[in-house]
Amino acid sequence: MRRKLVLTLTTTRGSRQIFLHQLLAWLLLIFLLLSAASFFVSNWLLVKTQDDLVSLERNHEALNEQYQLLLGTQRLYISELGDLGESLNSLSSEYAKLKEENALMGSSLSDLESRLGLSDRGSAQTLEQRIELAQVAARQRLFMLHSIPNGVPIEAEQINDSYGMRMHPILKRRKMHNGMDFKADRGTPVYATADGVVEYAGYRKGSGFGNLVVLQHNFGFKTYYAHLQKVLVKSGTFVSKGQKIALSGNSGRSTGAHLHYEVRHLYRPLNPKPFMQWGLENFDLLFTDVEDIPWESLSAMYPLNQAGPQ
């Protein structure tokens, strides 16, 4: 008879016998079940871990790409900051230069306003208005200075005879002298004292002027240039202020080389002296010293009636 190991379990409900081979069988079955469960769980955990590792690796790569992108952006940002700094430095330099130029311009504008007689009108106006007003005033003055005779017509050694009554050097009697006589060598250039048109250019018989140039100017003015050696312009042509129109000489009724210069308004001779002294620095002087001309009517003429900013 085979021997069997028997375990007896006694409880309050009674006794129960368990054979050892049955216990071993149950233990083996449980072990196999646990091993199988452990195998499947381990494989599941391994697969899940691998998936997590793959996901982590992808996340790492994505983070690395983002880091590189951020690094590049940071470098670009730093570069842009550097460029911006340079631009700001350049702008600051330009601003300082502009302030200096504005100060110089303001000084120049004040000087121009003073010369134009506008210095007492600029305090209540903007810089743009002051510049515009100065431009209008300058254009008006330049137009007048190009239209009405002013300055001297020749670089002369001296003035021999002025405007007024005198003892005529040839006729030997007192006679009205309608102009200025400038002592000058033959061939000295003679210049137009204003823009105009040549009314006469040539030898004037019976006048005593000899070779003569007569220029018509704006507002009814004329200038006469007499006793010339040579005439350089033709009748009917236009001339500009400062243009060389003749060479001084001794033609006609004359005792020596000189230039006889006259200023006339509507055929009436005027004293050339105020016109010779007139310029931008004393622009208003002519309109007060020469009283025989109705200057007030000029204000209605274009472009003199173009007012600047109020």
Image: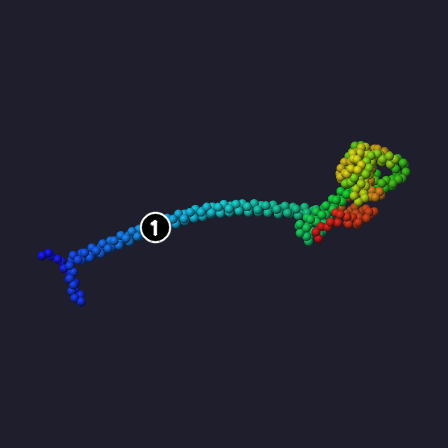
x 68%, y 53%: residue:
124
Q: What is the secondary structure assignment of the residue under circle 1?
A: helix
Q: Residue at x 59, y 47 (%)?
A: 95
Q: Quadrant of residue 173?
A: top right
154 to the left or right of 65: right
What residue type is disc 1 on?
Asp
Between residue 244 and residue 7, name the one nearer to us. Answer: 7
The relative height of residue 222 versus residue 47 in the rendered view (above or below) is above
Q: Which residue is identified by label 1?
A: 51
Is residue 66 visible from the viewing direction of this image? yes
Measured as percent of width and height from the top left, residue 207 is found at 87, 36
In the rendered image, residue 210, in percent from the top left (x then y), is placed at: 84, 34
In-front residue for pair 139/259:
139
Tell whether 108 sits left or right of 38.
right
Q: Residue at x 82, y 37 (%)?
A: 200
Name, please, the residue furthest toward the front: 1
At label 1, counting other C-alpha atoms closer than 10 Å, the crowd grade (few under 14, some 14-19, many 20 or more) is few
Observer-nearest residue: 176 or 218?
A: 218
Quadrant assignment for the N terminus: bottom left
Residue 191 in the image: state x and y as whole percent.
77, 37
Q: Is residue 259 visible?
A: no
Question: Percent position (x, y) of residue 195?
Answer: 77, 40
